[in-house]
Image (spheres, rainbow, N blue to C red):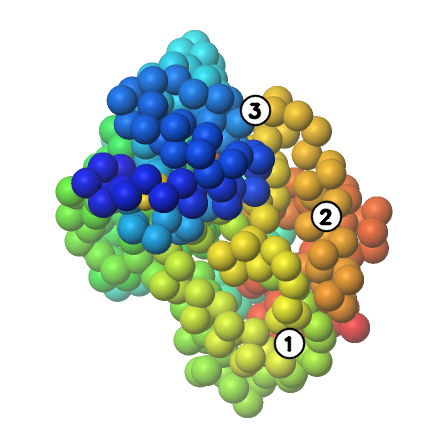
Amino acid sequence: MFKREQCDLCGDCLVDCQWMDVERGQAVEWIEAMMSGERTPVLDRCITCYACNEICPQGANPFDLIAGLQEKYHSLSSEESIAAQEARFEFSQELKDYPTAERVMSICVFGKTDAHLIQGELYDLPRVGGRPYFCWLLFSHIGAESVQRKRAQALVDRLALTGAREVVCFHDDCYAMLARLVPDYGIEVPFRPVHLSEYLVEFLKANKSRVKPLHMNIAYQRPCASRHTPEKEGFIDELFELVGVNRVKRAFDREKALCCAGIKMALGMGDPRPDQEKNILDAKNAGAQALVCLCPMCILSLSGIAQEYEMPLIFLGDLVRMAIGEKEHLG
Ligand code: SF4
Ligand code: SF4
């Protein structure tokens, strides 16, 4: 939620946005206009990377202000296309055949599209996935944040049916939704959302004797959703240390991470290639032998350009599988 009372009109959110070139005076003018509910060019230029929520020194959540207006003015998607997308993911039947366990993993809607990433010992725990467990975070990317808010309670209720005390989130979006956004909506979460990186760190620590250091230089592709939950970044660093890889220092990492631009492509907001190219080149020039991705959508979006520049993309879970000898080591 945008916290109007915390905004001191510094303009940082738009000045530091990687997707528009805005001078401070203009930024302040646009923020003020948006606070009055007015349409500004920001609504059409914002690719919904959530970065400004992390950039804002006052914690005012400027993206939430922008998202509300993108929905009000239908600047990203028409009412019809939002309704069609909502219908695509809706699940209204009675839920049957779900596991009950102390800990379950939610694989969101990746069971069919990315089954190859959900293989082996790491995923040998009760799992839920498919439409009933879709996390709806996509909707703030298409200018319909209210859909995500409206569907949040049903998602929590379905996951709670498992009786789990902990729900491991395969997708960063699900974690952002359950750990940050759902509580912000005032909805109680009766289980602890566990980020994939935390789960993988726990696995690595329990299987230390099986881990063979990978001795690689890697770059990390931090997904947009991580802007909502920066506090879990420590697990990412710990995981890299445990598998023996060096996270290279590069321009587009941590708070300066560059979105994979997949959503730019999906929304028809221009050619994503120059942005993707500079991202891959940044990793390459920093000495990375591979780009490690947490989000399957980043892999999908960057795969073409990565192949062109001979930069292997490795899913975070696969990095762990490589370290325990379940998957072939790239080096
Ligand atoms: S939302 Fe935050 S970054 Fe943007 S102008 Fe207000 S205080 Fe500054
Ligand atoms: S969400 Fe991203 S693209 Fe949109 S204004 Fe904020 S930083 Fe810029």
Question: Element under label 1?
Answer: strand
Please report whichever mark, 3 or 2, sits nearer to the chain's N-terminal start.
3
Whole-percent x, y for residue 266 in the image? 59, 27
45 to the left or right of 92: right
Which numbered mark, 3 or 2, is in the foreground of this view? 2
Of residue 31 and residue 108, the one placed in the foreground of this image is: 31
Residue 65 sits in quarter? top left
Of residue 235 and residue 67, the one placed in the foreground of this image is: 67
224 to the left or right of 19: left
Rendered-image quadrant of the N terminus: top left
279 to the left or right of 190: right
- Residue 164 visible (yes or no): yes
Q: How far apart are marks 2 and 1 (CA)?
A: 23 Å
Please report whichever mark, 3 or 1, sits nearer to the chain's N-terminal start.
1
313 to the left or right of 224: right
The residue at which mark 1 appears reads as 245
Mark 3 packing: few (<14 Cα in 10 Å), some, or many (20+)? few
The residue at which mark 2 appears reads as 278
Dots 2, 1 in contact, CB < 8 A: no
